[in-house]
Image (cartoon, rainbow, N blue to C red):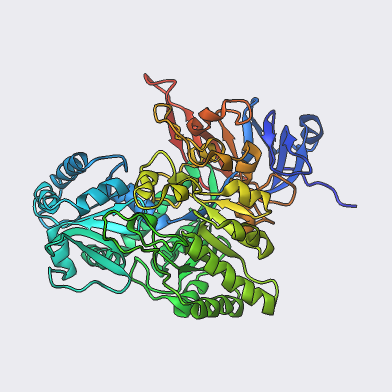
Amino acid sequence: MSTTPTPDTLFTGGRIWTQDPTRPWAQAVAVADGVITAVGDDGELTALAGPSTRRVDLAGRFAMPALVDAHIHLNLGGGQARWELPLAPTLGLDEVLAAVRAWAADLAPDEWVVGGILGSTTIAAVSQDRDALARLDEAAGGRPVLLRDDSMHNRWVSSAALRAMGVDRGTPDPDGGHYVRTPEGQLTGVLHEMASAVAESAFAASVPDPAARTLGAMEEAVRIVNSYGITSVQDAATTPAPVQALRTLEDEGRLTVRVVTSAPVRPFLEASVVGDELVAELRRHRSDLVRPDFVKVVLDGVPTTRTTALLTPYRCHHQHDTPEQGELYWTPEDLRAQVERCYDLGVGAKFHATGDASARAVLDAVEAVRAERGPGPLFHIAHAEWVHPDDLPRFAALDVVADASPYIWYPGVIVEAIAAEVPDELVDTLWPLRDLVESGAVVAAGSDWPCALPTPDPWTGLQTLVTRRNPDPSVTGDLNPAQAVDLPTALSAFTTGPARALGLEEEVGRIAPGLSADLVVLDQDLFEVPVEQVHATTVLQTWFRGALVHEVVPQEGPEAGAERVALSTP
């Protein structure tokens, strides 16, 4: 006869949303050795406590499972937060240049100005502005500049950066990329897709201690995701250096997040080995918290640069424009072979497929291989922006996850930039998440941080799944409102959905016996406040494997009543 062990930690007095359909609500949770051992009412669980049990009185606060981010870039996000010029995507050109000028004033004459996020509307404007590059050069004092846009697929660089890249007026475009020029052939400094990788390599070559920078970036990323209640993530494009940094943190007892990695199978935006060689390298670093279980496959680009693969043409801006629909980077044969390779290697795949044509290509390849080989690895389509109605039921039928990024909608400007390039009827069908849910598909939310917004704040994304509106009440209008979901469904997209997508459903995503004691305590009850206030949620505590890893506590002294962040590690 089994007995419940004496808990080392007991949470009581709370209003706890468990995300467990067998018991959605509870008052108390018992934890032993980092694992949940019992969930129930205060009375029944208090009886389990022993003399050494740590008691955590939730004092009526709302608690829920810690969140799972299904699509994040830890190294880019942490590096941006710790080392780089912060820009809001809503800034116009004059404001961006003022920020560059102020930042550069504290740098050495040849030091790079690196930062983001540059809004898609601003990068589109500088692509057409013959004077913008000269203005950027002046603002930076002649220094090399690299600014990343809100899709993270494109960059704006200065003349000094172009020289460091070895790029001049006569340089041909790289495969899969474009150096944007004026009609006269003058470089604008705007880089699309794989041209951005050339700039990133030039900047990386200037860093005196890359390992120290990467470790600092990963430390910052872990701190930030914990502060938003996130304890498990999928890093969406992973190279060896960040994984080595993660293992250092883990070996030192300072890694407080599970990381499922995704190895690019072809060259991407960071210089690295790719494909099977990278898969083998990352597997050598497998550990308790670092799981090299996926590859990353990029099928197309982003709609703002007309590189998303669509079934219908983009807008024609000029009378004699040739209709274009974007281009797939993979042939059907190569894509099917890659799906086969995932079966052979026993790894899942995250397919970057932002258009309805690219999503269909993935579904076709998966369908063909599953028909021959049966159930197999986990496959995701990121970011499921457009899905043809005929393809909606295929996600569930083929066990393909819809990796959604509601953070991208608001409060940034990327939707405005998308609307400038695609027909209204396509804008009106963006992100068909309700249809996907109702068809039985697994929807897994991911921030895609640092794309779109400067933080991986899940509460804005959670709110907009329900409202389909900008959290700023002064901004009117909504985005495909028929695709709104209710709050429990949205919560599933941040907990059980991504846990299932990452292969972690037996560890996280719910508050239930046998799962890891990962939970968060919030400053407001998500079921009691108006949904328009969900974005204002503050995480008071984050618990990872039964250890407190983030806490907001009252500040002492003359600023009493204010809040500060206190961190501890397991």
Q: Where in the figure is residue 259, as x and y percent of width and height?
A: 52, 59
Of residues 181 and 11, the one nearer the viewer is: 181
Q: 524 or 268, which lies in front?
A: 268
Asked whether, in this view, residue 292 is left or right of residue 198, the answer is right
Q: Depth check: 394 or 462 in front? A: 394
126 in relation to 264, above or below: above
Q: Nearer the viewer, residue 567 or 72?
A: 72
The quarter of the displayed image where residue 192 is located: bottom left
Q: Is residue 118 visible?
A: no
Residue 284 drawn at (x, y percent): 51, 74
**Side (left or right) of 107 relative to 263:** left
Q: Is residue 256 among the parts visible in the rendering?
A: yes
Q: Report x, y in % for residue 410.
A: 43, 40
558 left or right, relative to 46: left
Left or right? Give the position of 179 relative to 265. left
Q: Position of residue 209 (x, y in %)?
A: 27, 63
Give the total number of marks visible in the rendering: 0
Please give the name of the residue rendered at 61% of the width and 59% of the height, measured from the top-left corner.
390
Q: Residue 45: name its quadrant.
A: top right
Q: Name above or below for residue 293 compared with residue 515.
A: below
Kindly identify the residue that appears in the image at 34 percent across and 65 percent down.
Answer: 269
